[in-house]
Amino acid sequence: MKLSPKHVLTGLALLGALVIFYLKTNHIVFAEHKRFDDDIHRLRQVDASLNQDVLKSPFHLIEDYDRFPEEINALQKTTEELGGAIPSFTPPAGRGLIQQKVNELSQLLSQKEELLERFKSQNAVLNNSLRYLPVSGTELIEATAGDDQGRELKAILNEVMRQVLVYSLRTDDESAQEIHVSLSKLDEWRSRHRDDAQGAALASLAGHVKSIVQHKPRVEALMEQLVSIPVDQCLEEMQGVYDEQFARAMRRADLYRVGLYLLCGFLVVGIGYTIFALDAANTHLERRVAGRTSDLSRKNEELRLEIAERQRAEKLLAENEQRLRLILESEPECVKLVDADGILLEMNPAGLRMVEASHFGEVLGQSVYGIVAPDYHPVFRALNEAVFQGESRIAEYEIIGLKGTRRWMQTHACPLRDTAGKIFAQLAVTRDVTESRRVEAELAYERDLLRTLLENSPDQIYFKDRDSRFLKCSNALAGRFQVTHGDDLVGRCDFDYFTDEHARPAFEDEQEIIRTGRAMVGKVEKEIWKDSDGHKVTWVLTTKVPLQDKTGEIIGTFGISKDITAIKEAENKLEAVHKELLHTSRQAGMAEVATSVLHNVGNVLNSVNVSCAVISEKIGKSRIANVTKVAELLIQHADDVPAFFASDPVGQKLPHFLTKLAQRLSTEQAVVLDEVRLLAKNIEHIREIVAMQQSYANVAGVQEALPVQELVEDALHMNGAALARHGVKVIREYAAAPPVSVDKHKVLQILVNLMRNAKHALTDGGREDKQILVSIRRRDDHVAVSISDNGIGIAPENMTRIFAHGFTTKRGGHGFGLHSGVLAAREMGGRLAAHSDGPGRGATFTLELPINPPVTATPLPSKNRH
């Protein structure tokens, strides 16, 4: 069949239409579609990552602000590429809509870039204040004194720190108002304490707190603005526009495909093969499109799930990082990171305190070898090298803080690896062991002292458990038991070496100590040894005390026994000698008693002689003879007595004369009566001295509770005439004192003798200003009477002999008075002491009398009165 031009034209037209329809059906380029779609997803991922970095930066989870410009640049670059990569199959109207979204996205990114710069600036200031506040606040609290002013400041600082922490976690107006109130309290405190040394530091801390309150809302506002910029929404809308255009293109392709099918129907006879080929190509194309569409949907879902999972993981990571940072900051031990060269990369606040750094900037990037003491550089170098070879090590070394303080540190170090398994730092936990090393040194020193004591003490030292078995013994005890070393006695007891006569009481004493906790001090024990038929007997002086553990529980006993066998044997020999000498000593003492009686009576007789002389003088000079003359005169005028008194000049003067005579005689009588009473006292004193010495060997004198002042005044009165005759001035210094229980006549004997000696010392000294100072004062359970003079004094070589029997420095003295006085003072439970700064500087004798006398007052045998 000949084809007509019409047919040819129709065929050509159909062929051309077929070609056009076929080209329209396959005009969608899926590579362009995939690239455009991937670009949109990449933009959404980068934007999500940027938002996450922004959200993490206020919590110090990211400090590398250089990532922000990279992400912004990546977004802008991808957006520019996206504008030139719109698929060619997109119709002009759709292309315009997509280009409009691209332009809108560019504007949003520009806005985000501007906000991001402002955010970086504000967040840097906020983070600087947040880092400074805990360090400076802790240092201020630790440096604050413990008085009321310091406690008030600590309370304000703790409140500010707590409120800032709450504000950093939850920013609201109520928290900001609380912080402003606390800052007002701090300002008020500073105004009241303007001279406080921490004023500048407090002002700096207040400035940082105000900076936090000022910048935290701004940072959060900028962060919310950054996150709220609808970049993702714009991309999603762009994705929707593009998907719609893609769907329209696909529908147009389907329409052209229908037309292609119709054309193929017309050409089915002529181009059957072509129809089958086109059908196969179309089927394959549909499958590819369906597969690609399914793949895209599945990848979109996977990407969505991946984004959600990544967001959840990043949130969890942020929480964990925050928790880890809080743990490290509150950890009491030093946690640090050190690189292979010893450069410090990180350190927690506890470590900063150990190295005496006020903030991390002082040590960041510095070599650890600048802190480690030079002698321990090899130790730390070996530790660091071992860690970077993959080992975990423990080491101890000494450091020198930035302020010069030396500390001993114990470090547990291990390698820290990156995700590729490469060691990039040493992770070390370091604790201060200075105190423990000091305690160990003290314990070692005490162990050395104990070992030296146990090895070298001549006394027997031992420790026993609750069953009275030896735990530790000295070498002296080991030698006594004839064993090589004290450890050979461990587990043994007294029953292994002594008979029950000694071992049983010793065991019962130790059990009593364990039961009651009361010590046994200075007990004399008789030891009878086993395997000696009772012939080996030793004596020890033993002290035992409870042995306690660190909780105070009694776990045994500790004892010291001193061998006194030689002393006991010497005592037995002395007892025999004592009995032999007793009789001889008794006879010798009789002569001493007689001498003492004569001396003491002689002292009193001096006062008797003075009193007799005064009475004799007063009677010799008395006007009593004038009474006889008056009587004779009255007898002569007995017949005219009234006229005699009225007209006679002599009679007129007689009443006035009688009045004066009566007054003079009354004065003389009083003086004589005083001397008579003194004379009676002295005679009574002589009688008591004789009676006391007569009964001295059998019965003690009568103890009476007497006022000390009265005794002293009686003694002064007995010596008053002699003192006045020699021009001696008596000065009295009496303090309040309770009565003393003493033998009155013994005390008077001592005081009279001391005052008489003082008078002689003043007379021999030749001074014109003769003075005796008599003082009374209380000393604990005694009353002290001191008699001081400014006489000739006592030579140092005589101070140790003045109380010896027979020693004297006076011309015509016998050396009995002070000797008998010191013995009498001892018998009453008191003492007599002397003091002098040397010749010409006077002397002081002090008699101490007991307020409460001893329970028994048995007089010393005469053989001891030397």
Image (cartoon, rainbow, N blue to C red):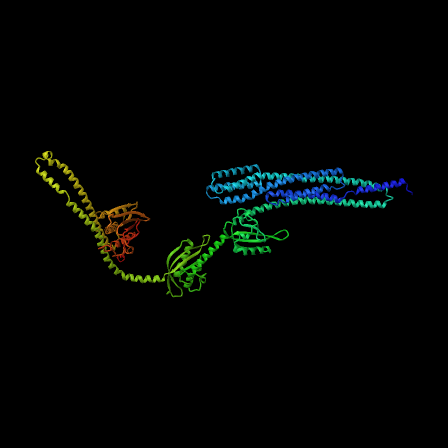
| Left or right: 79 in relation to 732 | right
- Left or right: residue 314 versus residue 818 is right
The structure residue drawn at horizontal position 68% and vertical position 42%, both measured from the top left corner, is 76
369, above or below 221, in the image = below
Extreme residue toward the right, this view: 1
Toward the viewer: 504 or 629? Answer: 629
x, y (%) of residue 5?
90, 40
Percent of width and height locating residue 247: 75, 40
Whole-percent x, y for residue 348 in the image: 55, 48
Q: How many marks?
A: 0
In the visual, does 269 lie left or right of 485?
A: right
The quadrant in which the C terminus is found is bottom left
Is residue 74 visible in the rendered structure shown here? yes
Residue 510's quadrant in the figure? Answer: bottom left
Q: Is residue 199 above or below residue 561?
A: above
Picture quadrant of residue 239? top right
For the point 48% across and 54% down, the residue is: 438
The answer to which of 493 and 138 lies nearer the viewer is 138
Image: 812 above or below 671: below
Residue 390 image offset from top left, x and y in percent: 60, 55
Tell me the quadrant of the picture where the N terminus can be found.
top right
Q: Please indicate, yes or no, whether residue 832 appears anywhere in the rendered image.
A: no
